[in-house]
Amino acid sequence: MTEQDLAHFSSFLAPSSILSTLSPSNTPADELTPFNDDWMGKYKGKSTTVLKPRTTEEVSKIVKYCNEKRIGIVPQGGNTGLVGGSVPVKDEVILSLSNLNKIRSFDPVSGKVTSSIPPSTPGYLTQQLGILVADAGCILQSLTDYLAPHDHIMPIDLGAKGRYALLPTRVKRNRLNCSCLVVT
Ligand SMILES: Cc1cc2nc3c(=O)[nH]c(=O)nc-3n(C[C@H](O)[C@H](O)[C@H](O)COP(=O)(O)OP(=O)(O)OC[C@H]3O[C@@H](n4cnc5c(N)ncnc54)[C@H](O)[C@@H]3O)c2cc1C
């Protein structure tokens, strides 16, 4: 990662979407510490640059450029994964999802799930799941708060819900239980 690379990212990202110790950003190194260190304080990265795209188009441009220049990328949600997976090993660019945090839509009707067995059968179930469409960087707590007035809940609850993003680990693992969730 060089100052020339930073100039390229600056050509399409807002200044507030870039944290870099490289010139001309010159962000103080301690502002990058929460991104370079893991939640447990066990792993420490040395990245000079955190990029916080606001749209999927910006993500696409970052990934395309890094691929062409062979610059490593570490995607990062809340950095609470506990196993060091979100911490750069060397000086990879940190691609933070923190600005991809919009709730796109909620449809309380379309997700109705009904058992395929006859209604008279014990265990017959009709459930109103709802369909929530949200950006990959939305944190669980904000989605839970959003759904509460709609009389729905998120079907996941963890100690880290105030900070972790949905995409990194939760969606794949919970796909069956969480058919009401679409991450863009
Ligand atoms: C207090 C606490 C309690 C917890 N309790 C539980 C629990 O009860 N059950 C449980 O299962 N887990 C628990 N966890 C762990 C929890 O699963 C993780 O914190 C969470 O899943 C990680 O989300 P994150 O946004 O912080 O991801 P990060 O730590 O930022 O990233 C996790 C991994 O996903 C990758 N990644 C991030 N974004 C993307 C992307 N857009 N595309 C591809 N890869 C990406 C990262 O590079 C990294 O490898 C707990 C954690 C804490 C801190």
Image (cartoon, rainbow, N blue to C red):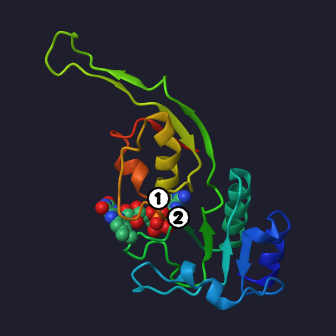
Q: Is residue 176 left or right of residue 48?
A: left
Ligand 1 located in image quadrant: bottom left
Query: Where's residue 98, x and y in %?
Result: 61, 63
Q: Is residue 123 above or below residue 43?
A: above
What residue sits 41% from the left and 44% below the top?
154
Pointer 2 residue Cβ closer than 8 Å to ligand 1: yes
The part of the image, by quadrant, that contains residue 21 is: bottom right
Q: Where, quadrant-wise, is the N terminus in this rendering?
A: bottom right
Q: Which numbered dot is residue 77?
A: 2
Disc 2, SS: loop
Amino acid of disc 1: Pro
The part of the image, by quadrant, that contains residue 13 is: bottom right
Pointer 1 residue Cβ closer than 8 Å to ligand 1: yes
Rounded to the nearest whole Å, what is the CA distance between mark 1 and mark 2?
7 Å
User: Which of the marked residues, 1 or 2, is nearer the chain's N terminus?
Assistant: 2
Disc 1, SS: loop
Q: Which numbered dot is residue 168?
A: 1
What residue sits 35% from the left and 53% below the top?
157
Q: Is residue 151 left or right of residue 119?
A: right
